[in-house]
Image (spheres, rainbow, N blue to C red):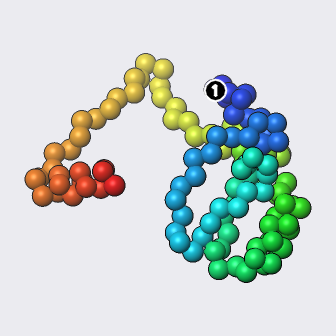
Amino acid sequence: MTIKLDKLLPLLITPPNLDLKPLPENLKYVYLGDDETQPVIISNALKPEQEEKLVRVLREHREAFGWTLADLKGLSPTFCTHTITLESEARPKRDPHQRLNALMMEVVQKEILK
């Protein structure tokens, strides 16, 4: 099994590409690093002075967080990587979709579009 080296560089060398998801109204993103790197999620209900103190403490201890596998010191990336072992002559196979009745198909289509 080979692991790409560019994915294993620590965050301080190469920040990862972020794909942040929308949060509920009571939460927001705060960035601990420069140029909007090292995101953490905090509550919107904090007062400005509370938020400032929290962010200061998080920045002081940012090495405790692991944004990439390389940031987790002492942990082998092979331990965190999932593989499916197949027999040498076996080939991966994709099964066809299961047929659904018309009502269920509409529900599935709505969920897919969500």
- Circle 1 crowding by C-alpha within 10 Å: few under 14, some 14–19, many from 20: few
Q: Residue furthest top?
A: 89
Q: Quadrant of residue 104?
A: bottom left
In the picture provided, is 44 more to the left or to the right than 53? left
Query: What residue lies at 69% left-to-right and 34% top-to-bottom?
Result: 7
Q: Determine if residue 75 is in view.
A: no
Q: Quadrant of residue 76?
A: top right
Image location of residue 101, percent across then percent down = 11, 53
Label 1 element class: loop
Q: Is residue 25 left or right of residue 8?
A: left
> Above or below — where is 22 with respect to 75?
below
Between 5 and 79, the one lying in front of the other is 5
Q: What residue does disc 1 label?
A: 1
**Which of 48/87 is in front?**
48
* Residue 56 visible in the displayed image: yes
Please state the horizontal and vertical placement of residue 98, each as a whole percent of the image: 20, 44
Q: Looking at the rendering, in which quadrant would you find the C terminus?
A: bottom left
Rendered residue at 34%/29% (across/down): 93
Direction right: furthest residue: 60
Instruction: Give 49 or 9, whichever is nearer the viewer.
Output: 49
* Residue type pointed to by label 1: Met
